[in-house]
Amino acid sequence: MYTLLTNYLNALLNESETAFKPVSYVCRQKTRYQVEIKQHSAGILELIPATLAKHSLILSCAVHGDETAPIEVLDKILADIVAGKIHLNSHLVIVFANIAAIKQNKRYVDTNLNRLFTTDLLNKPTQAGNYEEHRAEQICACLAKIYSAGRYPFRIHLDLHCSIKASIYPIFAVKPVKLVGGPVLVYNTPLRYPVQAIIHARKPSSTLSFYTANLLACSSATLELGKSAKLYNNQSNLLRQIYVHLVEGLACTELIPRFCVRSNRHFVVSDEVIKNTEAFHFIGSQPLLNFQSLVHGQPFVQLSNSNKQVSVGEQFICFANPDVEIGHRAALLLKKLHY
């Protein structure tokens, strides 16, 4: 088990998922730095420190299999905890989400995994042969089991991504909306990840961070950590930056009464652009950058053969992607919050 954990990503890339059975391993037994590591399923690991932790941190990566920098960082964090280089002071859950897509260096295999985490997921039937649907159900079942006893009242979830396109603010976060009547979020965290901008969602979604915020009472955010590259081809300074910010939170014992990311630049989602026809495309010869401002009164997207959408007022665009599946979101429209 020790060898597996110190080379975990390599094992995920080279072994069948069925080979990863539920198993546990204890590092540095009978010391103050003892950590029990439970493998609940392939790529889903729970790390329990010997000291009683008040808070729990979920770090997920590879919801999109081609967004690889966080994959490399979480693999190193796991290996460093096992080797005793990181002294863990929080309960930690690590999720390598879309393993099949990582292996194929693809965003997804059958469908976009980050559009499947609906709040009734565990009561919905899955399509036979659809890898992402089965994986979403598996991830949520494991998380439900881990938190079923009601332990760790201070829960944080950072879903780590890399953008598939260039961004005016390369390091940014999306804060999911909290539904009325759901479990109460407790905003005490040992981690406040610094980002260049925060997007505040105003509608329910089917992302993993929305799911954990509304089903598991986590202080949750989706983090976009620079431009994606092929596995093991990420810039070393980006990997180091991500590693340092996360490890600071893992080793910290102080609870801060704040949200889990911080920035002095805030945007709110004002609208979504949905792709409903094959004729859909963004207007212009250059790809739209994340946070690019749109010109008032100018059309920026061809919705169908005869219908264009025009920008109104001060608007910014994010996640513009014409290659999404029909019926899926192709972009977010943002407004800047002024204080």
Image (tube, grey):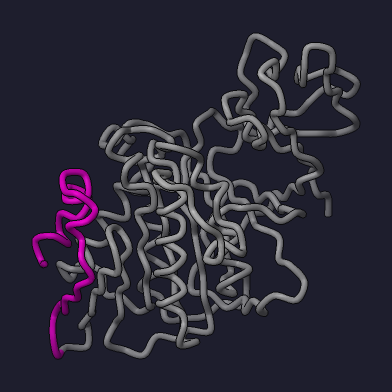
- Relative to residue 101, is residue 257 depicted above or below? below
Q: The C terminus lies in which quarter of the figure?
A: bottom right
Q: Report if residue 12 lies within the magenta region.
A: yes
Q: Is residue 181 left or right of residue 122?
A: right
In depth, the one of 136 and 298 nearer the eye is 136
Q: Is residue 285 left or right of residue 116?
A: right
In depth, the one of 92 and 87 nearer the eye is 92
Q: The N terminus lies in which quarter of the figure?
A: bottom left
- Residue drawn at point x = 66 percent, y = 78 percent: 183
Residue 285, quarter of the rendered image:
top right
Q: Report if residue 6 lies within the magenta region.
A: yes
Measured from the top left, where is residue 315 in percent x and y? 81, 34
* Residue at the top extreme, as displayed: 285
In depth, the one of 8 and 128 nearer the eye is 128
Measured from the top left, where is residue 32 in percent x and y? 22, 88
Q: Which residues are magenta?
A: 1-30
Label count reads 0
- Relative to residue 186, is residue 250 depicted above or below? above
- Residue drawn at point x = 83 percent, y = 18 percent: 308
Measured from the top left, where is residue 12 in percent x and y? 22, 50
